[in-house]
Amino acid sequence: MNKPIIALDFASRNEVEAFLANFNEPLFVKIGMELYYQEGPELVRYIKSLGHAVFLDLKLHDIPNTVESAMRGLAKLGVDMVNVHAAGGLEMMKAAKRGLGNNGTKLIAVTQLTSTSEEAMHSDQLIAASLEESVLHYAKRAHVAGLDGVVCSVHEARAIGEACGEEFLRVTPGIRPANVSADDQKRVATPKEARKNGSTHIVVGRAITKATDPAVSYGQINNEWSDAV
């Protein structure tokens, strides 16, 4: 399902149910830490029962054994995509893949958050490389680990595709229509820019979830994303 992934940045199941009631078609939605920690796996099962695809965005990052065990539990939910932090290292990513097994769930790794600027990366992480070099390095390590792709910004998507192959997923958050605020994201792009720069999937949150008519906003973004092929 290569539709825009809608970030369900809500605090409760009631808000999710009210939002999903605006749509009469299968969606691809993202459940992040805020929502999952409030509502747990039962919400995932509920959303899957409605026929929607789910990207479970928990960004696992721990020692390999712990991540493998956690991923083994998450695999039982039958989600369509799940992720880890590439910064956890090659062995951790391999462990995550082992824990997930061969159930068809796509496993991707977070490179650098789209809220991270190059200056912040240098000062907070003590990484001397450029932001693009850091992201590309993490992507290559995820590829070596056998993962299906990475989370990156639009600005690195093309280089990652060239380095890791076009089948390697480039899931890009920070997507905003031209007339919508960037909020706390530092590296943003429109759906059209994302498609033209090599993104395979886009994640859209507030531009849809906070819209006066979410279904209309989603339709416009989906059309722009699809028409840019």
Image (cartoon, rainbow, N blue to C red):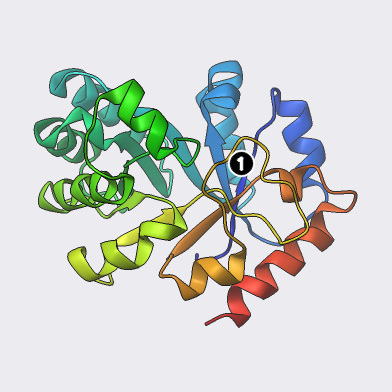
Q: Is residue 107 left or right of residue 32?
A: left
The residue identified by callout 1 is 47
In this view, the residue farthest toward the right is 212
Secondary structure category for the residue under label 1: helix
User: At which x and y percent is residue 19?
Assistant: 78, 42
Q: Residue at x 61, y 41 (%)?
A: 47
Q: Report the front residue among 147 and 46.
A: 147
Q: Report the front residue among 188 and 41.
A: 188
Count of numbered badges drawn on the protein: 1
Q: Amino acid at mark 1?
A: Ile
- Occupied quadrant, residue 112: top left
| Residue 178 in view, yes or no | yes
Q: Is residue 6 left or right of residue 105?
A: right
Q: Residues within 10 Å of mark 1 (few under 14, many from 20)?
A: many
| Residue 105 in view, yes or no | no
Q: Residue at x 88, y 53 (%)?
A: 213
User: At which x and y percent is residue 166?
Assistant: 28, 72
Q: Residue at x 15, y 30 (%)?
A: 92
Q: Is residue 169 left or right of residue 39?
A: left
Q: Report the front residue among 187 and 53.
A: 187
User: At which x and y percent is residue 24?
Assistant: 77, 60
Q: Residue at x 73, y 46 (%)?
A: 181
Q: Is residue 55 above or below residue 42?
A: below
User: At which x and y percent is residue 177?
Assistant: 70, 60
- Occupied quadrant, residue 13: top right
